[in-house]
């Protein structure tokens, strides 16, 4: 790991700097995301009617276009001034807009000076001024969220078209925000973005204030763009970071758990990929890649071990109609020499490379999440040992979250269990991190940062 050294005292003080700090709400609210959340949306809190009514009357008179459509749908009740006065979320938004260059956008896109003047004028509580500031804040907020959730040039493979980021509509942004239990917490936590994005944004702010080299700041921005396309925490989903070999899963506005994983070697990288986990397979077979059959299995057979004792069987191919063939009819020397391919599968059981379960999001790359008998690899600091798939530290725990109940015990091979609702999974790559020594980068195992490509 390489570090850009910043004294710890400076790091801590930066978290308290205006515009860079984010208080931790009790629960992170629903994000604007590509996939539909499975958790029930909370009802918005009822405003103080007596104090808000004069502001609502002014909003009705002043609102135009899409803003009028949004406010009409809520009886013209204010969002930023639910008690007749602008809340602290207005100042939080102003701080976010002032530091919008962290997001790769120009603060002046939001007419920031005029917005600040409007907010300042509304502090006297006069309904007309509060309504003017209310509408200006909503307009700037909708545009800001739309801008920072914009699609990027990150090279992600989308297995499901519905997961691909799309340009958001301002009214949809405001409606999503208005559905939060706490709009103040939603704005404070930047709840429309992935927690990974919020973390990296804070890291970039720290790096900029400390004078980090431009090239390293650009690496953090590259990480930010990878995080920008992830959903927020109210969307039920899984994130796998192949760089740090870690996995998180989210639901209901907050993380539900995380674990170590093993990801692909440099030669067999885990790709940037987004798909839908649709089913689990208990007691799976492992389809042995031909190169591994050549390097690992053929030499053992030539040394006198039987395919049966090694718990493999030879197949005509890997299709559903394939049949088992007699291993004695195979030219194992030709297989070992690389002149002949053989289709092997490892039988289910304790030594099976897939472990007890694998979670499937069908793809041509042959990538999935699965259990592993080699738990000792989880103790390694760098866990790039797989052929591209993701080996799980605790597959039963993830299975219980996906299925809503513990994985059942079954004896039959390849028992498929369909999820009640498919869950998005994002395989991504984050190298930027914060440490006690300062802002650092974990090893760029796949060389994706070094080439400044995604």
Image (cartoon, rainbow, N blue to C red):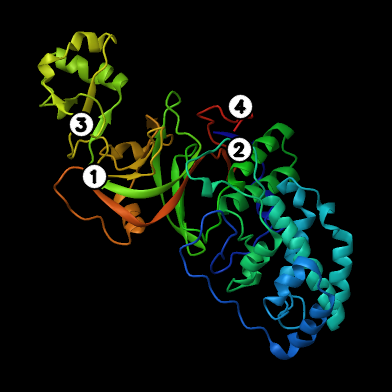
**Quadrant containing the N terminus in the rendered view:** top right
Q: Residue at x 87, y 77 (%)?
A: 129
Give the CA distance from mark 3 to mark 2.
36 Å
Category of crowding for the residue at label 2, using alpha-carbon neighbours closer than 10 angstroms: few (below 14), some (14–19), many (at least 20): some
According to the picture, the residue beneath numbered tag 4 turns out to be 450
399 left or right of 57 in image: left
State which mark lies toward you, 3 or 4. 3
Residue 433 sits in which quadrant?
A: top right
Report the residue marked by disc 1.
356
445 sits left or right of 50 in the view: left
Left or right: residue 127 compared with residue 374: right
Split into 4 quadrants, where in the image is the C terminus?
Answer: top right
Where residue 128 appears, as percent x and y from the top left, is 86, 80
Query: Which label's residue is closer to the chain start, 3 or 2?
Result: 2
**Reading the chain from its start, which is encountered first: label 1 or label 3?**
3
Q: CA distance from mark 4 to mark 1?
A: 37 Å
> Looking at the image, is 337 positioned above or below residue 283?
above
Question: What whole-number distance in Å separates the C-alpha atoms at marks 2 and 4?
Answer: 15 Å
> Residues at badges 3 and 2 in contact (C-beta under 8 Å)?
no
In primary-sequence order, the first of circles 2 and 1 is 2
Looking at the image, is 218 positioned above or below residue 144?
above
- From the viewer's side, name the closer residue of 64 and 284: 64
Q: Are marks 2 and 4 in contact (CB under 8 Å)?
A: no
Separation of residues labelled 2 and 1 (CA atoms): 34 Å
Tag of residue 154: 2
């Amino acid at each position: 790991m390489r570090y850009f050294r910043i004294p710890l005292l400076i790091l801590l003080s930066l978290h308290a700097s205006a515009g860079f700090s984010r208080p931790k709400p009790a629960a992170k609210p629903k994000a604007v995301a590509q996939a539909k959340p499975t958790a029930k949306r909370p009802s918005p809190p009822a405003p103080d009617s007596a104090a808000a009514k004069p502001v609502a009357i002014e909003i009705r008179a002043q609102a135009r276009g899409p803003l009028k459509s949004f406010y009409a749908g809520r009886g013209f009740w204010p969002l930023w001034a639910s008690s007749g006065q602008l809340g602290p979320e207005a100042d939080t938004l102003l701080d976010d807009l002032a530091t919008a260059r962290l997001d790769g956008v120009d603060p002046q896109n939001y007419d920031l000076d005029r917005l600040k003047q409007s907010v300042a004028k509304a502090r006297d509580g006069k309904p007309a001024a509060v309504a003017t500031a209310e509408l200006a804040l909503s307009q700037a907020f909708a545009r800001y969220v739309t801008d920072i959730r914009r699609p990027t040039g990150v090279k992600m493979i989308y297995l499901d078209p519905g997961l691909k980021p799309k340009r958001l509509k301002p009214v949809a942004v405001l409606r999503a925000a208005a559905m939060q239990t706490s709009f103040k917490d939603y704005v404070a936590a930047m709840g429309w973005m992935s927690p990974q994005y919020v973390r990296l944004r804070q890291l970039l702010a720290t790096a900029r204030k400390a004078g980090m080299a431009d090239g390293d700041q650009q690496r953090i921005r590259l990480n930010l763009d990878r995080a920008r396309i992830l959903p927020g925490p109210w969307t039920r989903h899984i994130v796998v970071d192949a760089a740090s070999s870690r996995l998180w899963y989210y639901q209901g506005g907050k993380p539900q758990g995380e674990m170590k994983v093993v990801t692909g070697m440099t030669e067999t990288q885990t790709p940037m990929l987004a798909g839908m986990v649709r089913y689990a397979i208990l007691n799976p077979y492992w389809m042995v890649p031909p190169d591994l059959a050549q390097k690992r299995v053929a030499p053992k057979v030539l040394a006198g071990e039987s395919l049966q004792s090694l718990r493999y069987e030879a197949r005509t191919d890997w299709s559903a109609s394939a049949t088992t063939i007699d291993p004695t009819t195979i030219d194992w020397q030709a297989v070992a020499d690389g002149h002949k391919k053989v289709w092997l599968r490892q039988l289910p059981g304790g030594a099976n490379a897939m472990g007890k379960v694998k979670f499937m999001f069908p793809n041509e790359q042959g990538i999935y999440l699965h259990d592993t008998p080699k738990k000792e690899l989880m103790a390694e600091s760098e866990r790039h040992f797989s052929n591209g798939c993701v080996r799980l530290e605790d597959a039963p725990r993830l299975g219980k979250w996906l299925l809503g109940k513990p994985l059942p015990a079954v004896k039959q091979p390849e028992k498929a269990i369909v999820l009640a609702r498919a869950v998005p999974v994002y395989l991504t790559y984050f190298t930027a991190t914060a440490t006690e020594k300062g802002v650092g980068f974990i090893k760029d195992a796949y060389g994706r940062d070094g080439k400044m490509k995604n």
